[in-house]
Image: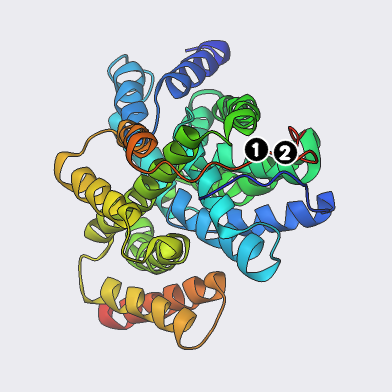
Amino acid sequence: MAEVAETRPRLSLAQLFTIFFKAGCGFGGGLGVLALLQEQLVTLRRILPDKELMTLWSIGRLMPSGTMTAVAVAVGYRLCGFIGTVVALIAMIIPGFICVVVLTIAYGYLAHGAVLEYIDATLLPAALGIVWISAIRLGKPLFRVSLDIAFAMVACLLLLVTHVNPAVMLLIGGFAGAILLRGPSEKKGPQEGTKR
Amino acid sequence: MSFGQLLLVIFTYNLLTFGNGSAVLALLQHRLVDDGVLGLNQFLYAYALGRVTPGQNNLYLASIGYMVSGWLGALGTIVAIQLPGYLVIPVLKGYERVRHQRSVQGFIRGLTAASVGLMFAVAFNIGQEALTGLVPWIVFVASLALVFLAKRGLLAGMVGAAILGLGLKFILSI
């Protein structure tokens, strides 16, 4: 099913910076960023297939620290090598970092005011909209009668009901998939090798 | 707390916690608030910033870094929370070598399916926190309408809906 492609599309560092800077402007946490990244990489520029981005995100969820950090490193590395990882991370962080530090400097003025409440009541619901859109777009390949969608539904319900650690749930899904969702074997062609 | 100690704490906690940002939050609260490095109000304010600013939620750690050690603390903290992400490179290289095996394909299928479930669970949880009144609901529906019906991009849809919400909040507060 979802694979990480082996050839690297050509992309300049400036283009990579632009893509991740725009993604870094997404509100709603990692999924908000993912939504904008999906729009840029999959929908508008067609640089990555949606399945590949989903695979990278899934693997990123298993990494320590932030999922989108791992996704930025993976995508940056795949598109522009090691320097791409640095460019992607810096670009993705800049919008949020500046906002966070400026608002921290303004702590004395804002901590007891209504500004944060205003932002919370307007930007967060707006971000929620794009989070749902992103979930629907990225989950689209699964929306058919299959064991995959059953896996997704069970995982969703268990996460909502049991509040189990998401990384543990993903690993359970992976190991269950290794037993129940074994795909057709794929022959490795001579041109395929380990990418960078 | 010195700059070095701050970086060590942030780096170690991030490295040790997988898939659950709230685990880092609990550990940090114990280390920073209970030990008197930050006040509870400062800590909660920093965490709130992670929700209302763009980018990943864990950027709130830059706020904590700034409160403890100024600009150097903010920059050092950001670097410390990004470094563990580089573990994905050897993981993907290893994956490339074994991805043709049927069991690995099944693992990735199961992992991806569970990830889709996780995305909807997270979206549902954010919804429970965010949709707390009429204005948030209007903003939420407006963002969907702007993207799906008006065919605006995601960023334009989000900003447009947020501006509508600010206008509504302002009118209702008069």
Residue nearest the viewer, comparing B63 with A50: A50
Q: Is residue B69 above or below residue A94?
A: above
Question: Residue A164 appears at what percent x and percent y?
Answer: 23, 35
**Label 1 packing within 10 angstroms: few (<14), some (14-19), many (20+):** many
Judging from the image, mark 1 belongs to the subunit labelled: A
Residue nearest the viewer, comparing B168 with B105: B105
Question: Residue A121 appears at what percent x and percent y?
Answer: 32, 65
Q: Is residue B110 above or below residue A26?
A: above
A104 relative to A93 in the view: left or right: left
What amino acid is found at the position of numbered circle 2 in the picture? Answer: Tyr
Judging from the image, mark 2 belongs to the subunit labelled: A
**Label 2 packing within 10 angstroms: few (<14), some (14-19), many (20+):** many
Question: Residue A138 appears at what percent x and percent y?
Answer: 47, 60
Label placed on residue B173 = none
What amino acid is found at the position of numbered circle 1 in the picture? Answer: Val
Which residue is drawn at the image coordinates 20% and 65% (left, top)? Answer: B132
Q: Is residue B16 above or below residue A21?
A: above
Q: Are marks 2 and 1 in contact (CB under 8 Å)?
A: yes
Q: Is residue A44 above or below residue A14?
A: below
Residue where numbered disc 1 is placed? A73
B147 relative to B30 in the view: left or right: right
Residue positioned most to the left: A161
Residue A66 visible: no
Residue where numbered disc 2 is placed? A77
Residue positioned most to the bottom: B150
B159 relative to B48 in the view: left or right: right
Which residue is drawn at the image coordinates 29% and 30% (left, top)? Answer: B40
Which residue is drawn at the image coordinates 76% and 34% (left, top)? Answer: A193
